[in-house]
Image (cartoon, rainbow, N blue to C red):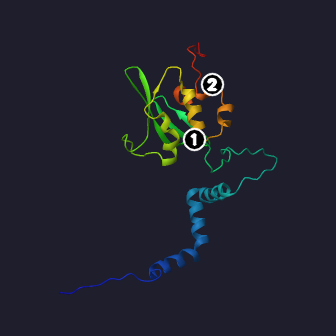
Amino acid sequence: MRVDIFSKRDGPRPEDVRAKRLISENAGTIRRLADQISNGGFTKMRQDEARRKQAPKPDGLLIYSMSTAARSDDPDPYVRVSLSGRVALVDSNNGHQIQLLGELRRSFGAQRFVLATAANGFVSPVSAEIEAALTQYEDVELGPDFTEKDIVQKFGACLGLSDKWQENRDEPELQTEKGHGIAEDDSSELL
């Protein structure tokens, strides 16, 4: 029995070196033939490609950057209550949820806040500091006079969040998750 062992060579293969040398030595002839066959299309294609790679030149042009505004990497948290009753800490810079604080659960007409802890069955429990700050609202019945706006303000105060977010927001924006940013009006502008 005969076994041939092929091992990988270092560097390019000799036939590849010969092919590259042949192409580079005859590049002018190859370009001329390509232009002749394509009726000048090959050179035009290469010129268009080179033009696309160039940066725009502001010769009397008005160039507008369509990128989003630069935002801080530091989160600016605020409390938000979703339509499904989830109470979360959200970053105002990008709208992403930072931490789920708990849920508002209704049973027999009563509304209670359930803190996101491992004991309550939450996969991602809150930290000990947040738990200590919000434990006064844990499993307490929240009456109808205690609105979502009150929850946002009280929980924000307990967590030591700045009130600038609440002061700069007007009432329709306070419930962006609930109303998806649309004013709650039954009339249609299309009619």
Residue at 57% of width from left, 27% of height from top?
Answer: 150
x, y percentage for residue 80?
54, 34
x, y percentage for residue 124?
42, 46
Marks 1 and 2, how far apart at CA:
22 Å
Q: Which mark is residue 159?
A: 1
Q: Is residue 65 left or right of residue 129?
A: right
Q: Quadrant of the N terminus?
A: bottom left
> Could you classify mark 1 by the number of other residues whose Cα lies within 10 Å: few (under 14), some (14-19), or many (20 or more)?
some
Name the amino acid type tagged 1. Leu
Q: Which mark is residue 171?
A: 2
Q: Quadrant of residue 47?
A: bottom right
Q: Is residue 85 left or right of residue 40?
A: left
Q: Is 61 located above or below residue 137 in the figure?
A: below
Dot 1 falls on a residue whose secondary structure is loop
Q: Farthest residue to the right: give it.
A: 60
Pick the front one: 107 or 170: 107
